[in-house]
Image: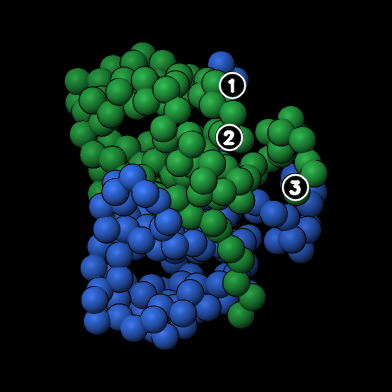
Chain colours: A green, B blue
């Protein structure tokens, strides 16, 4: 992985080793157009913030009634926790977060390195 | 993807099209040994529940202080929401959930189909 170019990594289906996961519940006042624009703005950070490798998102479709109100999931990938810290502090991210966070009634942010278990 | 064998899919790095994501906060009384055993038990469901394609997990390492107490992330993948429903209803899953859930003080479960955005 260390010799892989950023372009190759950005093209990879799953991106980097670390996941930066945001679960959000938008405020009732937020329109669908605002949500769509915010998602595009989030994706655009991949171009603006060098250590951000990839971005994907999805809307909750679960039937178990355990989403606790969190209906939007945003996942981005990074190579390390240091890269995530650089992303968090990057002016383009700070500017974006200042647009996104006021539209969220509730938010959870977790970072983790997914590992497989072989029982 | 439709012609791909389950074995091929299970060997894939990212698994199926749909993510089934569980965020959990274990109760204070839960020991590390119990957590380790529960993670192995979760991974073992891949062998027991046919539509479950893959399982990975991670512990939150975020610095932003927005994890809201959710420190364990379990992600599994499926090909469809119907497959997730089959998994949820499967006796092996029901038995496992009856072991896991009492150890969780808080839990969030979301299902989503991650999509990329090209701004």
- Residue B10 point in image, percent of width and height: 70, 61
| Residue A51 numbered tag | 2
Please tell me which of labels 2 and 3 falls first in the chain. Answer: 3
In the figure, A80 relative to B46: above or below?
A: above
Q: Nearer the viewer, mark 3 or mark 1?
A: 3
Give the chain letter at badge 2. Answer: A
Residue B65 left/right relative to A36: left
Distance between the Cα atoms at labels 3 and 1? 20 Å
| Residue nearer the viewer, A116 or A52 | A52
Res. A39 image quadrant: top left
Mark 2 Cα shell of 10 Å, populated few (<14), some (14-19), many (≥20): many
User: Which residue corresponds to the image point at 54% horizontal and 56% vertical from the top-left?
Assistant: A113
Residue named by callout 3: A2
- Residue A90 point in image, percent of width and height: 45, 28
Distance between the Cα atoms at labels 1 and 2? 10 Å
Can residue A3 be spotted in the picture?
Answer: yes
Can residue A35 be spotted in the picture?
Answer: no
User: Which residue corresponds to the image point at 25% horizontal and 25% vertical from the top-left?
Assistant: A103
User: Which residue corresponds to the image point at 69% horizontal and 54% vertical from the top-left?
Assistant: B13
Labels 3 and 1 in the same subunit? yes
| Residue nearer the viewer, B64 or A106 | B64
Give SS at disc 1: helix
Residue named by callout 1: A47
Distance between the Cα atoms at labels 2 and 3? 14 Å
């Amino acid at each position: 992985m260390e010799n892989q170019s950023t372009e190759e990594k950005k093209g990879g289906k799953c991106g980097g080793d670390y996941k930066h996961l945001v679960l959000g519940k938008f405020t009732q006042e937020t329109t669908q157009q605002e949500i769509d624009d915010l998602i595009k703005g989030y994706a655009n950070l991949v171009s603006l913030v060098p250590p951000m490798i990839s971005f994907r998102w999805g809307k909750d479709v679960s039937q178990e009634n355990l989403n606790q109100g969190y209906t939007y999931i945003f996942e981005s990938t990074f190579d390390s926790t240091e890269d995530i810290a650089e992303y968090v502090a990057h002016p383009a991210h700070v500017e974006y977060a200042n647009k996104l966070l006021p539209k969220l009634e509730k938010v959870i942010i977790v970072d983790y390195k997914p590992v497989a278990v072989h029982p």
